[in-house]
Image: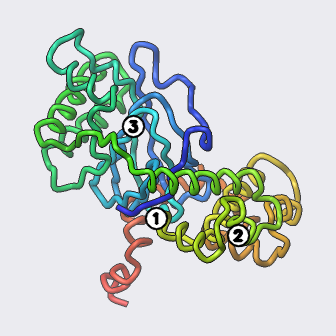
Amino acid sequence: MENAPIVTKNQAYRETFQRGTVVFPVQYSLCDTTNPHYDLPLHWHSEFELIHVIAGNYNIFIEDKTIKLEKNDLCLVPADLVHGDAQDKGMALYESIVFEIDLLRLHSYSPDIFFTDILNESIILDNYIPEKHTEILDAASKIFEAVKHKDEETGLIAVGWMLIFFGLLKKKRLYSEKNLNLSRAKETRTDQISNVLNFIRKNYNKDLNLQDMAEAVALSPKYFCRLFKENTGHTPIEYLNWFRINRACTLLRETNEKLLEIAMECGFNDFSYFTKTFRRYKGITPSKYRTFDPAKAKEIIIDPDYLWEKNHPEESEESSGD
């Protein structure tokens, strides 16, 4: 896991739509990060989320850290935590379920004590659950398999496996007690990083430079750059470009504006630099992104073998005998 900027809830949008059905509030998703239309922006919701990497490698940002997930790793995101793609999200096929924790409450029986501690944040669940925890991975696999069917009978099975999943988390002690004594230095650093992220979101379309971002948090450019790099793994300019490109993706999908207009609107004064940067982050040019049809590419995009070849080209070449 790598440190990353701490993002507050007011800097990410809240998802509030209905998950699944009223009687079974669980949403299943299959996601392919190599799909140019794929994007998981920073957000938060009142439900829990469980992620399972089927193939490839996926990097997820959760509130103050980046977690690197490999094939068969799990990631648990408790309620109300800001999360989304890391800046370098990797190439992966993963599945996720978003669910109401009330599905598992048993009206004051023993498990409720554990869930109450989770909801009260007196204990903090581990986000990263590596493949080596085979019992937990098996329980998670049963959950995903049951949820896919979306009927009453398998819904009961899914809830049963969810209880087993959380029971195993407790048994393996994959949680920690909350440290209530956050140092003043860390609080200050958190505020500075949060403030500059908010500054970028409000001013990304302007001609920003390192000096502008440093002044936004009253730091010298040299110290600010080091602080930002230490806490995010990326330079301020890298993060700025990443944010601008994601904004450009939205405009390409939702408007008919010309490419040059979109580049200018997103803070790129040099069109060739915009195209080069876009390709760096999305793997294709802006024009191809706009005309990309995910339905036509679905069969190859969700193929785990295809993802493996993209992630390990040198091994694929060796195995082909060329």
On screen, 245 above or below 317?
above
Q: Residues within 10 Å of mark 1 (few under 14, many from 20)?
A: some
Point out residue 175 in the picture as x, y percentages from the top left corner: 22, 42
Please report whichever mark, 3 or 2, sits nearer to the chain's N-terminal start: 3
Pick the quarter of the image with the N terminus. bottom left
Q: Residues within 10 Å of mark 3 (few under 14, many from 20)?
A: many
Residue indicated by mark 1: 90
Q: Nearer the viewer, mark 3 or mark 2?
A: 3
Hey, what amino acid is under mark 2? Answer: Thr
The answer to whether marks 1 and 2 mark residues whose Cβ atoms lie closer than 8 Å is no
Residue indicated by mark 3: 49
Q: Residues within 10 Å of mark 2 (few under 14, many from 20)?
A: some
In depth, the one of 83 and 192 nearer the eye is 192
Q: Residue at x 79, y 60 (%)?
A: 266
Point out residue 286 in the picture as x, y percentages from the top left corner: 74, 65
Give the SS element for disc 3.
strand
Query: Toward which corner of the image does residue 96 lie, by quadrant?
Result: top left
Which residue extends farthest top?
Answer: 107
Point out residue 287 in the picture as x, y percentages from the top left corner: 76, 65
Hey, what amino acid is under mark 1? Answer: Gly
Please report whichever mark, 1 or 2, sits nearer to the chain's N-terminal start: 1
Q: How many marks?
A: 3
Which residue extends farthest bottom?
Answer: 322
Q: Nearer the viewer, mark 1 or mark 2?
A: 1
Residue indicated by mark 2: 285
